[in-house]
Image: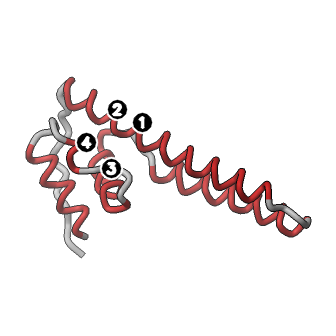
Amino acid sequence: MKQIAMEHGHWSPSEKKIAHAVFEAALEQELAHTLAEFKRRAAALNSADQMWALRSFLESSEREIQGKYDFRCSQLLFVFGRLVREGRVSAAQLQGLSQDKLDTIRRIVEL
């Protein structure tokens, strides 16, 4: 597995603003998708087993979302790489980040 050098500790104020906006938009989109899926499943409930399965879906979704969305500067490039790979964020949304950060995100996407 390739090693990604993380030498991007400094985020300018404009980069922080871009990162925050992109991060929040992706998080809100994923939460909205999860809520819609919850409502769809809840509307189709016919048994206690389905009810417990719905609870498991929510718990699993919560763990995944909490694990994925980490706004620490040391993790953001990995977060954005994953979100780009998943199609939740486009490379165009990240324009304004330094070229070295964009290159690192691109390398993470390619892993």
Q: Which numbered tag is attached to residue 24?
A: 1
Q: Does label 4 or label 1 sit earlier along the sequence?
A: 1
Q: Nearer the viewer, mark 4 or mark 1?
A: 4
- Which residue type carries mark 4? Gln
Circle 3 residues within 10 Å: few <14, some 14–19, many ≥20: some
User: Are circles 2 and 1 on residues that touch, CB within 8 Å?
Assistant: yes
- Residue that badge 4 annotates: 93
User: How far apart, in angstroms, are the residues tagged by discs 2 and 4?
Assistant: 9 Å
For the point 77% across and 66% down, the residue is 53
Residue receiving disc 3: 89
Q: Which residue is mark 2?
A: 21
Q: CA distance from mark 4 to mark 3?
A: 7 Å
Q: Secondary structure at mark 3?
A: loop
Residue 49 in which image quadrant:
bottom right
Mark 2 residue element = helix
Q: In the rendered structure, which amino acid carries the disc numbered 2?
A: Ala
